[in-house]
Image: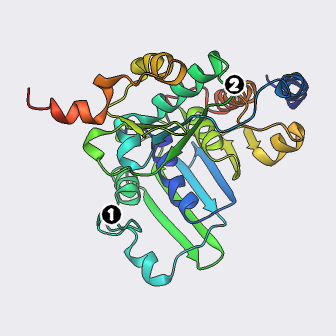
Amino acid sequence: MRDVSLHILDIVENSLRAGASLIQIDIAADIPHDTLTVTIGDNGSGMSEEMLERVRSPFTTTRTTRKVGLGIPLFAAGCENTGGHLEIESTLGQGTKLTAVYSFGHIDRPPLGNIAESIASLVLANPQVDFVYTARKDETFEFDTRMIKATLDGVAITEPSVMAFIREYLEEGTMQVFGGQDI
Amino acid sequence: MKTLKELEEIRNKTLSQIDIRKKGEGIRIVVGMATCGIAAGARPVLTALVEEVAKRNLSDVTVSQTGCIGACRLEPMVEVYTPGKDKVTYVKVNPSMVSRIVAEHIVNGNPVTEYTIGYSEENKNS
């Protein structure tokens, strides 16, 4: 995975598989504390304590076709390479929250990447799921598909003209907060 | 800065066009987007597909994503489901291949043979 936005796209797949109807993605750059924190929370099926203990291993997966799953181990390794860490909290039946912390200024921290494209891809491919995306640095930008759907009032969020709007809206908002993909 | 006011205008414009379109069972294009697909570059492929479908105004075509299709070394993979026909699987897809897939296969109904998994596997040693 070349950047943070690709990890997000990957990890959210777990939330979708867990049957989540609401997924919250929060990216916060805290320069004074030298952290870049990515939080992904969902209201999916959650995990048992036993699963939670095993989930960081590459040899854990819910797939039945194969015995490896690399999403979480890759994300965790990327954080740890910068002196950061990755935590997962989960309650069976209530949902899961993953927190990934990078040292912001560490030379091995991957760039943020095209987060707008990641979020737009998720919205497009999962129109029945709601997403809240928050970008925070000195300013805050929030995108909430529940508000978008309320405004659309019956028009599908996957309509090409709507998706074009969403992509630009996400790009502008992310740009305003972080100043670009390369932070 | 874009505002939700603009979205409302888009909505009203879209709504007036929607009724004209034919409804029915359409072609489904699915992109494999598990860890393997994403790492191999599936996201720009998905974006390119959506843009190409939007550009040609193919209203009965849907683009969506799925998990691991099961042949990670051939990612990014794209599957095309046409009602009444066999599924076609494209392998090692990149955004520059998308316009040809959409033009020849989705619009004209002729799968692009040299991009398919069958062709790739038969010719992999040549």
> Which residue bears the numbered disc 2?
A164
* Circle 2 residues within 10 Å: few <14, some 14–19, many ≥20: some
Q: Is residue A26 above or below residue A143?
A: below
Mark 1 lies on residue: A65
**Amino acid type, label 2:** Ala
> Colour mode?
rainbow
- Residue B28 at what x, y percent from top left? 56, 38
Q: Which of these two is toward me, A89 or B55?
A: B55
Residue at left offset 72%, top offset 28% = A169
Q: Quadrant of the N terminus of chain A?
A: top left
**Whole-percent x and y of residue B52?**
56, 20
Q: Nearer the viewer, residue B14 or A86?
A: B14
The answer to whether A66 is drawn above or below residue A46 in the figure is: above
Residue A42 x %, y %: 64, 62
Q: Is residue A119 visible?
A: yes
Same chain for labels 1 and 2? Say yes or no: yes
